[in-house]
Amino acid sequence: MSEAPQDDKPAPLVSHLTELRRRLLWAMLAVLVFLVPLAIFARDLYALLAGPLMQHLPAGTSMIATEVASPFLAPFKLAAVSALVLAMPVVLWQVWAFIAPGLYAHERRFAFPLMFMSSLLFYLGIAFAYFVVLPLVLGFFVSMAPEGIAVMTDISRYLDFVLTLFLAFGAAFQIPVATVLMVRTGMTTPAALASKRAYVLVGAFVAGMLLTPPDIFSQSLLAVPAYLLYEAGIVLARWMVPGYREVEIQRGERES
């Protein structure tokens, strides 16, 4: 007997739209709750973000603002992005509350821990980028400045660079989630993923070479965590996806 969604009675379109609006309002309220205090202390927040760069700037130099509104817009943009990131668990919960009634029981059991794991890994990726990657990358860039060149970075460009770095590592830390989803949807199996370890390792170092300064240490900062997260994804797929062994056996029989 097949499972039925939590609520198998069809609801009118107006009811769905009303529920969607309610969930969106709660999500926006959560972002606003974080935005108000962060906006008040936006300058202090930006000073915290600029800390890794200020430590490497030569004495007598500082960051600059090349646009009239940058001293206001750059800290406020950082406050807005930070509010969205901090409110992400509430936003994802609202998304979950909206779609959960239409899911089967086994889908709800699978989706909720995956959403929680995705949020946690995103935060870990940002923390890793801020505390480990950013100081090393900025130190390398500042040290490579030619003789007689004063490094005075624009605050808006620095913010864009850091946010891009945070997004890149936050996305890279989603590798276990993507791996589990691929196995769950039948696109691949843990055995097939494990057989491609050598290619993934080489690809991770190629990505590290393209996205980080050209030294083996900086490349390893991205490549090694990415590969370890790939291995973690294989382990999680074997734990979270029931029936994967049967799929592997069937694929092996077709290939033999």
Image (cartoon, rainbow, N blue to C red):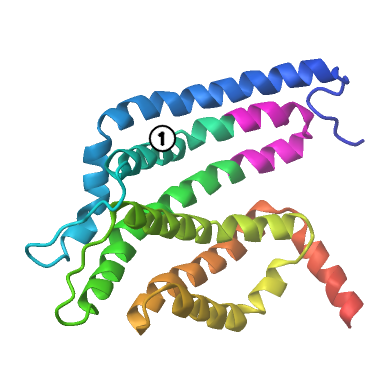
Q: Amino acid at mark 1?
A: Ala
Report whether 136 appears left or right of 31.
left
Residue nearest the observer in this picture, 156 or 46: 156
Is 184 in the magenta? no
Q: Position of residue 140 (x, y in %)?
A: 26, 75
Over which residues does the magenta segment extend? 94-113
Which residue is located at x 28 percent, y 57 percent?
154
In this view, 141 is above or below 135: below
Farthest residue, direction left: 60
For residue 112, which quarter of the picture?
top right
Question: Please, what is the dominant secondary structure of the magenta stretch?
Answer: helix
Q: Position of residue 22 (x, y in %)?
A: 63, 18
Q: Position of residue 80 (x, y in %)?
A: 41, 36
Farthest residue, direction front: 68
Is 98 in the magenta? yes
Report whether 98 appears left or right of 31.
right
In this view, 180 is above or below 144: above
Report whether 2 appears left or right of 170.
right
In this view, 79 is above or below 51: above
Q: Which residue is mark 1?
A: 83
